[in-house]
Amino acid sequence: MELIYKLLETILPFHFMGYSFMKNAFIAILIITPLFGILGTMIVNNRLAFFSDALGHSALTGIAIGVVFGISDTNLSMVIFAVIFALLLNYIKRKNTVSTDTIISVFASLSTALGLVVLSKGGNFSKYSSLLVGDILSIKPKEILFLVLIFVVTLIFWGFAFNQLHAISLNETLAKSKNIHVNLIDNIFVIIIAFIVMLSIKWVGILIINALLILPAASSRNLATNMREYHAFSILISMFSGITGLILSYYNNTATGPTIVIIASVVFFSTLLCKPYVK
Amino acid sequence: MNQIEKNSMECQTRHKELESNACGLHCIKINHIGVTLGKENILNDVNLHIHCGRLTSIIGKNGAGKSTLLKAILGEIPHEGTIEFKDIKNNVYRDLKIGYVPQHLNIAKNTPTSVYDLVASYISKVPVFFMKSKKTYLKIKEQLKIFEADELIDKAVCDLSGGELQRVLLSIATMNEPNLLILDEPVSGIDQNGMELFYQIIDRLKREYDLAIILVSHDLNYVKQYSDYVVLLDKTIIKEGTADEVFQSNTFYKTFGKLVYMEE
């Protein structure tokens, strides 16, 4: 860690790099943003925007469960709950009996309400309100390690299964006829989304996490014509917004997550304007 | 003579009637297929022999179970009965390789998927987001060429016309040299020229390659013109035979009325 700190100070000899919380936040941004950029591409392709949003809201219940059962590390209860939540939604989606957005909406509302009720018992909710907007400046090296781990897992999954995931998103029956394990790949994908959303929600916040997942990929679609460009632009836009947002929030003394979202939105509208000339 | 021998004799005699380059030694037998979803009986005791080098069309009203039958053959939904693929020459059962052409793709406008990305996702292990594999690229281009679609390889899939997309999907379906090609109403939203070209390609495919084709279609004129065998479905097979036999039957009139036939 010391080595990375030194490296950062040498490469970016700015005043803000003098603080270790800024160094941690910077490293976290360097991991979270490309991860969101990559994942966002398939979330947008698979029309899972609503799903990932619901997943973010389920974090409240995850924490509430942790509090009720006295689990000291609420990360654990959050991740477990989110994985179950994601698999359940996937199962219901496959059953195809009710409209998917209705179901997601019902589950999201329920889990938000449940979480709020439990956490606000005794008037203590203010303790958890930082979850709503997140605080990346409070991230610790150990928590960065978790992010690195999930980043590596995602890269491995993407490397081995991206083609299959892409094939499934285009047509499931066709994918099945090519011997692709549709349910397995799809389930792993939503589990990974669940992990990433839960492990980063404390740093970017429930209210805006979805914007960070969706905006870079959505901007990239305005420019890209194939999958390689799609990923490259998405990652670049995500990292650019993240780093710029962090630095701006430091100098303007604003919350980091929302600042990043504003930058990402500006980028989105710019790409929308550029679209007719690029594509 | 036992049942198996009898069946293979039957298959062989049928093949002699055909004039094609297909080996005529493969036979796909669909035995007693039934599908029940919930309490509703959708398909009942469907029996069908499908031969290589032959286009078998399935026609019927909406809700007659055409798509369900395809899904059962593809193994996507639970069903009763069996599907056997037999090599008559050696008299052994083999694994059936199925190529499938879907009705449409779930692809939104503005999706940055090129034709290369689409095809490579189904056939290659090199992740398409990472790099374009030269070997795969050439292989895909060669395959697309068979269907007069090689110049589309770098185009975005969502910008293709209906006819172009169908030719690309055909390329994917035939990539691993299937024994059976399944076409699920493959020509919806395609202009007249595209339709003509599509059916000509199918016709060529069945003559030049060693495979059987099942087509589900609403376009009775094309079915009549190109099919070797027609199956009229309404929960079970209510009439089967050559196009003329089926189209001139009473059952056909009862199902589609006179108007449809007169259109021709």
Image: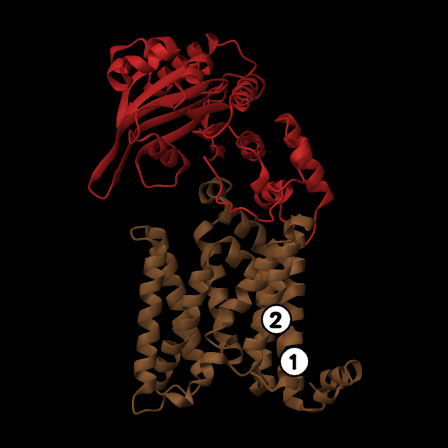
Chain colours: A brown, B red
Work out whether mark 1 precedes mark 2 in sequence or the reverse, and give the earlier one: 1
| Residue B171, above or below A67 | above
Badge 2 sits on which subunit?
A: A
Q: How many marks?
A: 2
Q: With A171 as the anchor, is B36 left or right in this view?
A: left
Q: With A117 as the anchor, is B118 left or right in this view?
A: right
Residue A153 in view: yes
Residue in the image at 36% along x and 57% along y:
A101
The numbered mark at residue A263 is 2
The front one of A203 and A192 is A203
Q: With B256 as the anchor, is B205 left or right in this view?
A: right
Q: Quadrant of the rendered structure where residue B81 is?
A: top left
The front one of A206 and A88 is A206
Badge 1 sits on which subunit?
A: A
Q: Position of residue A249 (x, y in %)?
A: 62, 82
Q: Position of residue A197 (x, y in %)?
A: 49, 71
Q: Quadrant of the rendered structure where residue A259 is?
A: bottom right
The answer to the question of whether label 1 and label 2 lie on touching residues, with beta carbons closer than 8 A, is yes
Residue behind mark 1: A248
Q: Quadrant of the rendered structure where residue B140 is?
A: top right
Q: Label 1 vs label 2: CA separation?
A: 10 Å
Callout 1 amino acid: Leu
Q: With B246 as the anchor, is A218 left or right in this view?
A: right
Q: Quadrant of the N terminus of chain A?
A: bottom right
The front one of B128 and B79 is B128
